[in-house]
Image (cartoon, rainbow, N blue to C red):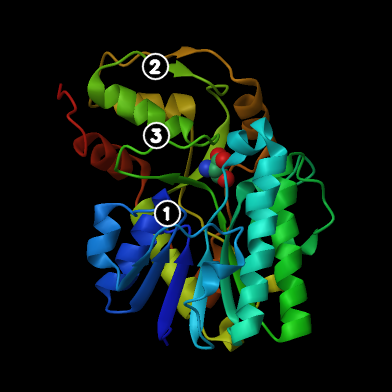
Amino acid sequence: MPASQTLIVGAGGAVGKRLTAALAARGSRVIAADRMPQLPDSITSIASVCVGGVDVRDQEALEHADADTTVWNLAAPLSVETALDPAVAEAVTMGGMSKVLTAMREVGARRICFTDSIGSFGAEAPRSGATARWLTENPTQDPGSDYGRQKRGCRELMAEFASAAGGDPRFAVLPGVLHSEAIWGNGTTEYALDALLAASKGEQYECPVEPDVTLPMIFVDDLMRGLLALQDAEESALHEPENGYAMPGLSFSAEELFEEIRRHVPDFVPTTKLDDNMAKFARLWPDTLSTTEPLRDLGYAPQVAVPKMVETCLEAHAYRKM
Ligand code: AKB
């Protein structure tokens, strides 16, 4: 049953904008909040209510919530940004989550949805397969980065909210999100977006991760279906520990991506220039995500495969046909 009202903290980010639009499109009342004084026009025009100037670190961030409000907390820096300034990232990621949950307790709101990341998996995690269960069944594993540790810290805060305040926490483990818009983000899987953009503009590209490392990704349309299914699911339908679900999409290495891009842009021949953080994270993280649990409990399965994703992303820009 769709929530009566959804508040999205971090609505100005890449995922937040699309989620706001998806909720508004199905007629839900949405409150789109972000620290930007003015949210992008696309949000102002689609959202029911748009609250600019909201910083997740401020308690007032949630003043528009009531007991029936579902809250999405999307406000967090990506992996490389976190590695470059872990203290600021912690204040936003974990400090923000703490403020969100406190404010929810004050109004009696229960459902908190959070976007975790494959960055929560460490070197000890299996590279492939049953990673959805592994994450929650091995909560003490060291993710190997501040990014993963801060995400894990948020899950701990949510678990505490569930036991102490009767909250209804749920989270999605996100792989790399593939947007058809030109969006810049200081993460690891974002290399794929940069490559697609460079190819579509006929520019040279330097690959910052080892070309043979496979990472899980998801096309944004699939992600929206998965996130809405997670938000809408009855509590009794959720069977995973901590109500956490990996969101599977597609998996590829950089060289497989480049090969697919070359079907449209034949002279796209990247060179490799490794970035220390990105190369390290890409090696740490799993290469595929289990499809079993999201299909069983949420009815979610990915639909977009690599050729369609590449075609859509290149078409969204001015790409040169063969
Ligand atoms: C990143 O690479 O930092 C993010 C993520 C997968 O968490 N895109």
Crowding around mark 2 (Cα neighbors within 10 Å: few <14, some 14 to 19, many 20+) is some
Q: Is residue 126 visible?
A: no
Residue type, numbered disc 3: Leu
Residue drawn 54% across and 36% down? Answer: 187
Residue 115, quarter of the rendered image: bottom right
Report the residue marked by disc 1.
15
Q: In the depicted view, which residue is nearer to us: 206 or 106?
A: 106
Q: Position of residue 67 (x, y in %)?
A: 54, 88
Q: Position of residue 146 (x, y in %)?
A: 73, 41
Q: Quadrant of ligand 1?
A: top right
For the residues marked 2 and 1, what is the alpha-carbon distance in whole angstroms?
25 Å
Residue 127, quarter of the rendered image: top right
Indicate which disc, 2 or 1, sits on the residue closer to the N terminus.
Answer: 1
Residue type, numbered disc 2: Tyr
Q: In the depicted view, which residue is nearer to us: 187 or 296?
A: 187
Q: In the depicted view, which residue is nearer to us: 210 or 127?
A: 210
Q: Is residue 139 above or below residue 148?
A: below
Residue drawn 22% across and 63% down? Answer: 45
Report the residue marked by disc 3.
193
| Left or right: where 306 falls relative to 207 | left
Crowding around mark 3 (Cα neighbors within 10 Å: few <14, some 14 to 19, many 20+) is many
For the residues carrying marks 1 and 3, which lies nearer the camera in this image?
A: 1
